[in-house]
Image (cartoon, rainbow, N blue to C red):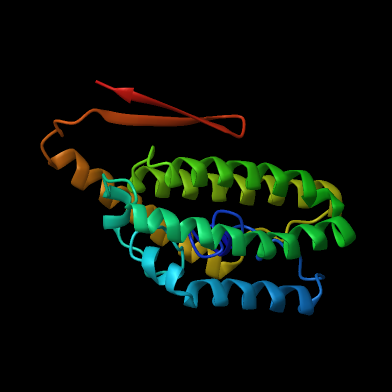
Amino acid sequence: MRASLFLLAAFVVPALTGCTQLMTQEGPAETRAKLAKCAAENRATPEGQTIAGRLWIGDGTDTATKLLDPYPLTPAERSALVQLHNSAVQCRQTVTAHADQSAAWQSAYLQEYIQRSDEIFYKLTSGALPVGLANKLSIESDRKLQVDLSIAYYDNVGRVDGIRIAEAKRERATDALLEQSDRIAASQPQPRSPAMNCAWSGNTLNCTTLR
C-alpha cells in the first residue's frame, strides 16, 4: 500500500495512504483508477496546495524539513485540512468498499488504520500536535498498515505480494530523511518551549508534554 495515498498526508488525508499497493493485483482496475483520480483531485484543490508544503505526502518530494517542523498548523491550514478530510472520506469509501466486497480479510486492518489517521487528524486540526511530529506518526502508522496487510495476505492467500520495488525504494528514501532529521535535531540547541512526546496505545494516540 502506498502510504501516502491516504494520508497523503494530506491529500487524501490520513486514510488513503496505505491502501493502493496492497490492494492486490487481482483488484479491479476500475477501483484503482477511482482511487487515483480521487487522490489527484484532492491534491489539486486550493486546500491541498495550502498544506502540501508542510504535511507528509510520500511521493518522493518530501524533505527532512517536514519532519523537523516544530509548529502546529495555522488556523487557515487547519481549515484547509478539515475540508480535505471531508473529501478524503469519499476516497476511503472506495477502498473499504473494495475490501468488503473482494478482500474481507483487509477490512479490520483498514479500519484500524483509519482510526489512527483520524487520531492524527483531530490533533492536527485542534492545534495540539506539531506538524513534524504528526508527519513522523503518519509514517509510523502507514508502515504498520503495510506490515499488517503483508502478514495477513500471506496467511489468507498463501503467498506474499509484499511491498513492491517502487515502494521499497520510497521507504529507503524516507528512512534516509528520518535519519537526517534526527541528526539535525541532535545538533541543534534544545528548544526553550516544552517538547511533546506521542506514542500509540493500540490505535489511540497518547501525547504528553515533556518539561
Residue farthest to the left, as pictured: 189
Q: Residue 32: percent from the left, percent from the top? A: 71, 74
Is residue 170 in view? yes
Where does residue 166 sit, x and y in percent of width and height?
Answer: 54, 70
Quadrant that contains the N terminus: bottom right
Q: Which residue is more in the foreground, 132 or 48?
A: 48
* Residue drawn at 58 percent across, 42 percent down: 116
Which image quadrant: the C terminus? top left
Which residue is farthest right? 101
Q: Tell me the quarter of the picture where residue 191 sits.
A: top left
209 vs 183: above or below: above
Task: Say whether residue 64 is left or right of residue 30.
Answer: left
Closest to the observer, 193 or 161: 193
- Residue 31's spot in the image, x, y percent? 76, 73
User: Do we see residue 1 in this rendering?
Assistant: no
- The vertical placement of 84 against 204, above or below, is below
What is the quadrant of residue 86 in the picture? Answer: bottom right
Tell me the residue at 71%/76% (across/down). 34
Out of 132 and 22, give the one closest to the viewer: 132
Q: Looking at the picture, does residue 211 appear above or below residue 168? A: above
Q: Residue at x 69, y 61 (%)?
A: 22
Q: What residue sits 37% from the left and 70% below the top?
A: 61
Total marks shown come to 0
The image shows residue 207 at horizontal and vertical percentages of 43, 28
